[in-house]
Image (cartoon, rainbow, N blue to C red):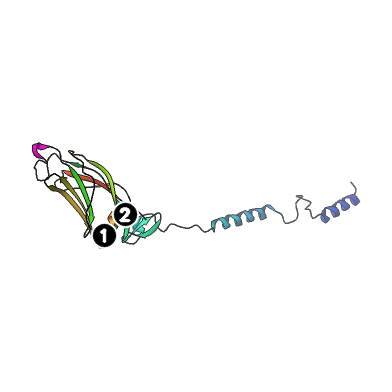
Amino acid sequence: MNAHALMVLSLLMASLGCDQGSGRPPGDSDADTDADADADADADTDTDVDEPECTKHSHCDSDELCWYEECENALDRKYRFTVLDAEVGTHTPDGDTWDMGGGAPDLAVALYFDGDEPLWTSTVDDSFSPTWDQYADLVMESGGTFYVELWDIDTSSHDFAAGWYWEGNDALVWLARTEGEEFSVDDSSGTIEVWMSVEPRF
């Protein structure tokens, strides 16, 4: 190819906006491509992501619980109190037999807040290990006291077996923060244990 033909070809490529060395438009370099990629990455990093208000109860105030990643007031709300089952010894905490002849007791559980009428489970007859799996929906009021009582139900009289209570806001918030997890309470003699759960209903 002579010098005149080369000049014509160069002028033609210049008119088409091409870089003779790479065949790309001038300025379209690898450096520019990397910068664009960095800008895209920065844009992705800057995207707003909603952070949860809480992931555990300690992230909330003392009268709140962490519920579905939000701090909620724990008190003056409705909860489901479930009585699951119990285990009792062959004798009462005082060492007496439950029934005449040494038979097993007829057990029921009462749930209530101070000032309210007790709500009762059914009675399980003649059992040292009764199962109820029964519940009551109650409002856990600020400043209240919650009671759980186990009774031996007899025809002539009902005999108190054991009882527990949670008094004041700190104790009630502890109950609320169990979030439906099963827990047990036992009496001082170590012969009675009752399993239950407390679950928010809001």
Residue 5 position (above or below residue 60): above
| Residue at numbered disc 1 | 170
Numbered circle sitting on residue 83:
none
Q: Observer-nearest residue: 30 or 62?
A: 62
The x, y position of residue 138, in whole percent, is 29, 55
Residue at the disc numbered 2: 79
Q: Which residues are magenta?
A: 97-103
Is 70 left or right of 156, judged from the image as shown?
right
Mark 1 or mark 2, earlier in chain: 2
Please tell me which residue is depicted at 90% across the width and 50% down the height of the picture. Answer: 5
Above or below: residue 90 compared with residue 5: above
The amino acid type of the residue labelled 2 equals Tyr
Tell me if residue 177 can be seen: no
Q: How many marks?
A: 2
Q: Residue 122 sits in which quadrant?
A: top left
What is the x, y in percent for residue 56?
36, 54
**33 displayed left or right of 173:** right
Give the structural element (helix, strand or loop) at label 1.
helix
**Where residue 158 sits: x, y (%)?**
14, 47
Residue type pointed to by label 1? Asp
The 10 Å Cα crowd at callout 1, few under 14, some 14 to 19, many 20 or more, is some
- Label 2's element? strand
